[in-house]
Amino acid sequence: MIHNISPNDAAARLAAGTALLVDVREAGEFAARHAAGSLSRPLSLADQGPLLCGSGIDVIFTCQTGRRTAANAARLAALVPGRRGLVLDGGLDGWARAGQKLVGSEAALPLPLMRQVQIAAGLLVLAGVALAVLVAPGFIALAGFVGAGLTFAGVSGWCGMARLLALMPWNRPAAPVPAAPLAA
């Protein structure tokens, strides 16, 4: 089961050593800006098994705004079997509004991943239409394929193009990022 927690309550638990903050955004997003002391465990790696941390430690999940963690609450709950998982209200944006410290380098990520998806999808659609007009009508299938992919991403919450773009070199952090919490 996943419950919400306010940024100030989360910060108090982190300071007391009774909680672990886990950021579920992609590595490039994490490198650009994250809560001090948080660990990176992207949703794209959620299938690597449960998080291991000491008994009595609450796991608090966060993303940018809280929408990603809310949409994936069941997957996140599976990462902390037998214990209560928490979601940071308002994500990192809420953390910053509450005056809590953020660290990272805004230059680490040239563009947010979803903007990269929008640019790539737009260029593929334009290319498909231009090729259909200038070369052969069958190229219109490229535009249709991209439209179908975007529709699937909107309905399912899974975007293959975003996963592919997240693997690109410009979306990887320059410095190593902690990948998983320490085992108990």
Image (spheres, rainbow, N blue to C red):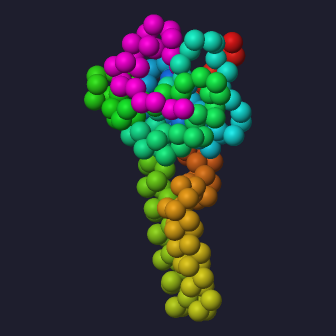
Judged left or right of residue 183, residue 39 is left
Res. 112 visible in picture: yes
Q: How many marks?
A: 0
Asked if the stretch drawn in magenta spans residue 107, the answer is no
Question: Based on the displayed image, in which of its 4 quarters is residue 136 positioned?
Answer: bottom right
Judging depth in this view, the residue of 48 and 27 nearest the camera is: 48
Q: Which residues are magenta?
A: 1-20
Rendered-image quadrant of the C terminus: top right
Res. 27 visible in picture: no
Query: Residue 74 placed where, x, y %?
Result: 57, 40
Judging depth in this view, the residue of 26 and 86 nearest the camera is: 86
Query: Residue 33 placed where, x, y %?
Result: 43, 32
Q: Residue at x 62, y 44 (%)?
A: 44
Asked if the stretch drawn in magenta spans residue 14, the answer is yes
Question: Based on the displayed image, in which of its 4 quarters is residue 99 positioned?
Answer: top left
Q: Residue at x 46, y 62 (%)?
A: 119
Rendered-image quadrant of the N terminus: top right
Q: Residue at x 43, y 55 (%)?
A: 115
